[in-house]
Amino acid sequence: MSSKSIEGTGGAGRAGDKVFSGITLLAGCLILLVLFSVAVFLLWQALPTFTADSADISGGEGFFTYIWPLVIGTVIAAAIALLIATPVGIGVALFISHYAPRRMAQGLGYLIDLLAAIPSVVYGAWGMMVLAPALVGPYTWLADNAGWIPIFSGPASQTGKTMLTAGIVLSVMVLPIITSLTREIFLQTPKLHEEAALAMGATRWEMVRMAVFPFARPGVISAVMLGLGRALGETMAVALVLSSGGLIASLIRPGNQTIAAEIALNFPEAYGLRLSELIAAGLVLFLITLAVNVIARWIISRHKEFSGAN
């Protein structure tokens, strides 16, 4: 091959690199632009709420008094979902990646992926018509036998539409996200690390604890944070399962609401200052989600050098 043809090939390659680099830079800037535009829109539309008289806000006591119960309800529902879905999701992912036979692992993987494809309104209908009535008995038992604990204080809901029911439904919804991502991360563990642990006499569980978990820790945190984002922003499932009410400490009594469900239930008929209130609530949810992701990235950056990948 002549020197001219080599130079031509090199020039074309460098031109392709520049084009590809420019496209990726444009894509990154586009994401930032969209995020900035959403933040500006929410802030601009929410300004009337922040400048309005307290008596004109829903509840008549100001925006903070209105939004605070919704923030607490959102956090409680998401926390319940993560407390249930995280250990179950990690356990299922570990079983699929390291314990189950190949055919069973493939079938379970397809089933988990299928759960992620089910619309949220279907989960909400299932929670409202099947899960909630089935939990009335257990809620009554908790109120009678564990009512001295504030979160189980009675009287228990006779419809089953409580914050605990909403949290259980959300846990089923975020389970596929946590399981699928965690499974793929577990499968990426270097085989040399696993074989070295087994060669040193470790049992399979000890190998998982010493090789798989350290390697997968940052990825598992990311998977949990993605599940948290889904739980924080879910609307229809929570709206169908929860009975609206004021802020209460008990998880088995009717009451509480989340920001996303509040917006979904009231937005179609809202206008004027009420519309601005709901957009301001969306701004609060946006800030909560942003803060959660920033904290997650900070946690991951602290532990990445101990991930076992290096």
Image (spheres, rainbow, N blue to C red):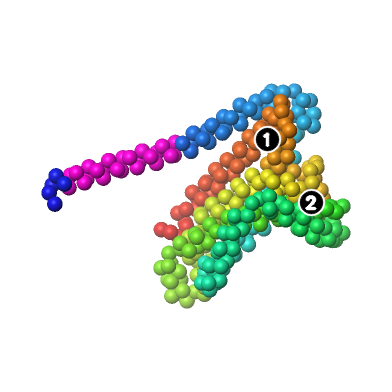
Q: CA distance from mark 2 to mark 1?
A: 23 Å
Q: Looking at the magenta stretch, what is its main secondary structure?
A: helix
- Give the residue type at disc 1: Ala
Residue 45 in view in this figure:
yes
Q: Earlier in the sequence, mark 2 or mark 1?
A: 2
Name above or below for residue 5 compared with residue 267.
below
15 with respect to 288 (left or right): left
Q: Is residue 15 magenta?
A: yes
Residue occupying the point 49% across, 49% down: 301
Residue occupying the point 60% across, 42% down: 289
Task: Please state the extent of the stretch shown in magenta in the rendering.
Answer: 6-29
- Give the residue type at disc 2: Lys
Q: Is residue 42 magenta?
A: no
Per the image, the residue denoted by label 2 is 161
Q: In the displayed orientation, state which residue is furthest to the left.
A: 2
Tag shown at residue 281: 1
